[in-house]
Amino acid sequence: MTLFTLKIIAIITMFLDHYYRIIGGPEWLSILGRLAFPIFAFSISEGYSHTKNVNKYLMRLLNFAIIIQLPNFLGFQEYPLNIFFTLALGLFCLEILDNNKINIVVRYIVVLYLCFLAEKTGLDYGAYGVILIILFNKLRNNKLYIFIAFLALNLVILKIGNLSEMQIYSIFSLIPIFLYNGKKGYGMKYFFYLFYPLHFIFLYFLNELLGRMR
């Protein structure tokens, strides 16, 4: 399974989850939606490992995060800062952890502080999202360790964090992730960036239309 296919699975399950949140429907839509973020986190980890210019990659994420913030102001999301800020912060943390010019203790202190900020500033998925990106990168190519760490992270966050208990279903995202063949597949990277704000706009107007028809 290529990275392109994984991203298609991620945006489909994300769409189903947001359909459930905005318009309504059976709960299984949101359960399927739990697969989306871990796949996005995995794609950031893979992107970091293969990109020729991390800073350019980071700036692209931040630029899109700022541009697509408008739909959140219109009330499409319950979190004030969209998921692209979380992905960008996770990528930045990977860059810090791999910076050998900085003392290793300082590196981890900085990353822990950034995880704390992710929680306090209301980033979508908060520290959980940032840690998940780091987990996929540092345990890369070791499926057993990824499974154990992923499960442990979910159990800890469910105990002390503010994520829904439904997040435990995200463990099933490891099925397609473990089927990843290391190939990029089709490009279309801007399609995935643009899909995020466009699907919120579509669901907003669909909800308005359905509301008038009731």
Image (spheres, helix red, strand yellow):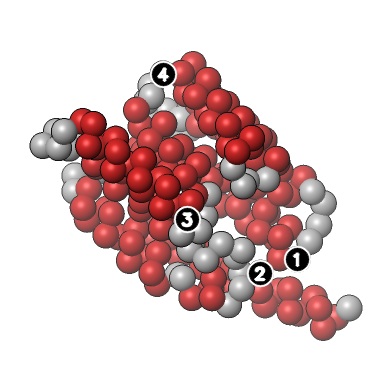
Residue denoted by label 4: 142
In this figure, what is the number of numbered marks? Answer: 4
Question: Residue 47: where, in percent of width, then height?
Answer: 32, 42
Q: Please tell me which residue is depicted at 77% across the width and 45% down the height of the picture.
A: 28
- Which residue type does callout 4 highlight? Asn
Relative to 71, does residue 83 appear above or below in the rendering?
above
> Which dot, 1 or 3, sits closer to the camera?
3
Question: Residue 182: where, in percent of width, then height?
Answer: 37, 30
Residue denoted by label 1: 23
Residue denoted by label 2: 203
> Which dot, 2 or 4, sits closer to the camera?
4
> Which dot, 2 or 3, sits closer to the camera?
3
The answer to which of marks 1 and 3 sits earlier in the sequence is: 1
Question: Residue 132: where, in percent of width, then height?
Answer: 46, 37
Q: Please tell me which residue is depicted at 62% across the width and 47% down the height of the picture.
A: 162
What's the CA distance linking mark 2 and mark 4? 38 Å
What's the CA distance linking mark 1 and mark 3? 29 Å
* Nearest to the observer: residue 70 or residue 131: 131
What's the CA distance linking mark 2 and mark 3? 28 Å
Residue 18 visible in image? yes
The answer to which of marks 2 and 3 sits earlier in the sequence is: 3
Residue 158: image quadrant is top right
Position of 11 with respect to 33 (left or right) is left
Q: Please tell me which residue is depicted at 44% across the width and 52% down the height of the picture.
A: 118
Relative to 198, does residue 14 appear above or below in the rendering?
above
Residue denoted by label 3: 120
* Nearest to the observer: residue 105 or residue 56: 105
* Nearest to the observer: residue 146 or residue 153: 153
Q: Residue furthest bottom?
A: 212
**Image marks 2 and 1: residues in contact by CB distance under 8 Å:** yes
The answer to which of marks 2 and 1 sits earlier in the sequence is: 1
What's the CA distance linking mark 2 and mark 1? 8 Å
